[in-house]
Image: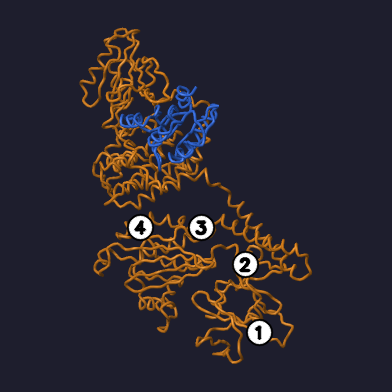
Amino acid sequence: MGEISNNSSSAGIDLSQFYQVFFEEAGENLELMEQKLLELNVDAADDEEMNAIFRCAHSVKGGAATFGFSDVAALTHQMETLLDKLRRHELTPTSAMVDVLLAAGDALKAQLAVHQGSASSAPDTSELLGRIRAMAEGQAPAPVAKAAAPAPAAVVSPTLKSMPVPKAQTRAIELVVGPLEKPETADALSELFKEIEDLGTIEPLDGGRAADGMRRFRVVTTTSDSELLDLFTFHVARELIQMRSTDPGFGFFHENAGAPPEENPVDPGYGFFEPLPDASPAEAAPAPASAEDVAASTPVAAAPKAAAKAVEKSVATPDQATLRVSIEKVDQLINLVGELVITQAMLAQNSREGQLNQQLLAGLTDLERNTRDLQEAVMSIRMIPMSMVFNRFPRMLRDLAAKLDKKVELVTQGEATELDKSLVEKITDPLTHLVRNSCDHGIELPADRLARGKPEHGTITLVASHQGGSIVIEVRDDGRGLNRAKLISKARERGIDAPDSMTDQEVYSLIFAPGFSTADQVTDVSGRGVGMDVVKKNITSLGGTVEIDSAEGYGMSVKVRLPLTLAIMDGMSIGVGDECYILPLASVVESFQVAPGMIKTIGGSGRVVEVRDEFMPVIDLERVFEVPRFDFEHVSNIMVVVEAEGARVALLVDELLGQQQVVVKNLEANYRKVQDVSGATIMGDGRVALILDTGSLVRRTRH
Amino acid sequence: MHTILAVDDSPSMRQMVAFTLKNAGFNVVEAVDGQDAFEKSSQRDYNLVLTDQNMPRMDGISLTKKLRENPKFKQTPILILTTESSDQMKMAGRAAGATGWLVKPFDPAKLIEVIGKVVR
């Protein structure tokens, strides 16, 4: 709808106070629209999906027009026109339309960024507007090569102000001309409408007579005000011409309840609604041919239902069910709870030692439970669903596949799986890299796939799930998989030691070696020889692991295992001498008492222990950490087997102290990086214990 | 004090409308869509229902129909806020029993002006 009247004030209300809400809402709508567009099956578009997409554009337009962001309103208006025709099956969706709508979504984001002050210039959308308009009018999309030249429909290039009223829209205006010395002069204007085809219709409202030298006409036209004015000024001076919309923008159904008494019908400002089928002069434009009018009618049957299920989540929440809080506040809360957990553990420990009042003991038990609950609740504040990461991939893959001439489908599972926000941020880049790799190197070209008897469309599957205290994210593709021989020869070319006896797992792990790239040709998408090693490094630094599995010709899977949060960890405390260390419980496999003779020395200094026919390296923690020992008679005789990076080692310790949840304190931030140590924690008795980096310990045995 | 039920799925529009109405001295109950409004309709009496048309779950015209089935809402003015004013929409609005329509975008002054005609 065009700008109806600019002469009324805003009733003293500053609309800018609603901008922020509008920006957030528009952002959510655009995200949802993009997601829906990407999911859209152009060959069998679902009505409800189409409605949901329409509603996104519609909502953004409504808000933008209300709050005065005319560029956003203009673009969404054009999108809405196209989407409306699509949802009414007046046009058939094509992937070119999806492309243009996606591009329009990007442009809208840029425009909104400018209005929010986070960007300085918005892209020129005149070409985009022209393309959408051409599509909405049923024309073939302009070929991309010609896109640089303005599309025909965009030549008009109206000002932003008049943009929301597109050229094709029929509207009714009241034309007042005068005061005129000779009222007949104005009849020349009527002649214009006879002479110029397509200009519209004009009819006198005053029966051809001027009461006060003023002539009044009703004009129904698709031509813009400025163009009309240019025409009229051939006959009448510009300053004598007034044009105003005859549509007051509201009206009442007088036979229905609550309507006000009918006012004097002379009042031209209000369109009371009498004979419905043949609209009164004060009534708005005739319905057909008007893109705007077609929009959003027949609303009852088709719209709601399933579309609601998707939209519900985005509309019902923002200001009703959620609260935006700065991340610092949450972090502070987590820190404080961490301290509370430590204090509680200390109290619990101390209470075991002395004689205690029974009530005090009961109180301590309650405190422990409440503390644990509080900790869980606070930690959950920072947990966000994996869908926040997964959502970016459909668009990325779509663009990527188009660039590579591949056909790729993305399947995501377990989007609701929650992960700590700080981890989500850090895992996004490595995952993006893995997905790009799958598309670029994994999935074959459609012809190659068909030749191998595979479906033309490759599938990349993203799965997130909780497994124990970890989250496992798998990136799987059904592409060409890894070629063992090729990997080994490539490794040797690069001077990496790669014996034929390596297990498949070990061979696959070669792709994590720095500078290792298996692509025969470097593409501009991924694979300049950097990447997988960085991916691995990033994931390892988060306390995670990466596993690769593959079957040549059938695809490949990369599993990333991450702790749910970096702030707390389930640990096993072990004693060596007078020192206490923490092992991440997730990496502990088993522990056992060593019988004499189980440990064998091989080579020069390496020691191994045999566990159920399997030999694994032994690491003597006492030596690694140079633990001072005063009891020289003592012999460590307990082994704890830990697994990391696909390998196992046995750690020789003095005693197992127990399992507990520990609050992880960063050692690097408070002290400096220490070899084989990933962090520290404060124990119940107030002592500091180091948390061992099992990955680093395992790597130690490889050299 | 008059109480208005303001229904819109767009948080920014809803806030703008609610703020404007409160500023003009009305009591406002907000609803996020037709379904929500319908559920809230039984909780108290309203002097006016102001509803958006295009909403998920239940649109404005369906809400109007359902409200008119309730004797309590027989005489309550119901205004539909819409981005279009086609005859089709008007016929549907009239048939549903709506009191009138107001075309979006509107500014706060216009809203108060129109409400002033039906709520006194």
Instruction: Please say if the residues under marks 1 and 2 sit with CB atoms less than 8 Å apart.
Output: no
Q: Secondary structure at mark 4?
A: helix
Q: Earlier in the sequence, mark 2 or mark 3?
A: 3
Q: Chain of mark 2?
A: A
For residue B81, which quarter of the picture? top left
Mark before the other along the chain sequence, 1 or 2: 1
**Mark sitting earlier along the chain (1/4):** 4
Nearer the N terminus, badge 1 or badge 3?
3
Q: Which chain is orange?
A: A
| Residue under the image location 53 percent in, 46 percent down | A321
Foreground tag (4 vs 2): 2
For the residues beneath circles 1 and 2, the answer to whether they share a chain is: yes
Real-space CA distance between mark 2 and mark 3, rounded to the nearest whole angstrom: 24 Å
Number of the label disc, if any, that sits on residue A425: 3
Q: Which residue is mark 2?
A: A661
The residue closer to the viewer here, A110 or A663, is A663
Mark 4–mark 2 Cα distance, whole angstroms, equals 43 Å
- As drawn, A317 above or below A400: above
Chain letter for blue, please: B
Kindly identify which numbered label has been placed on residue A400: 4
Q: Nearer the viewer, mark 2 or mark 3?
A: 2
Identify residue for label 1.
A636
Q: Earlier in the sequence, mark 4 or mark 2?
A: 4
> Left or right of B57: which side holds A603?
right
Chain letter of the residue beneath label 1 in the structure image? A
Q: Amino acid at mark 2?
A: Gln
- Which amino acid, by three-letter code, is at mark 3? Glu
Indicate the amino acid at tag 1: Ser
Camera-side mark, 1 or 3: 1
Residue drawn at 59 percent across, 68 percent down: A570
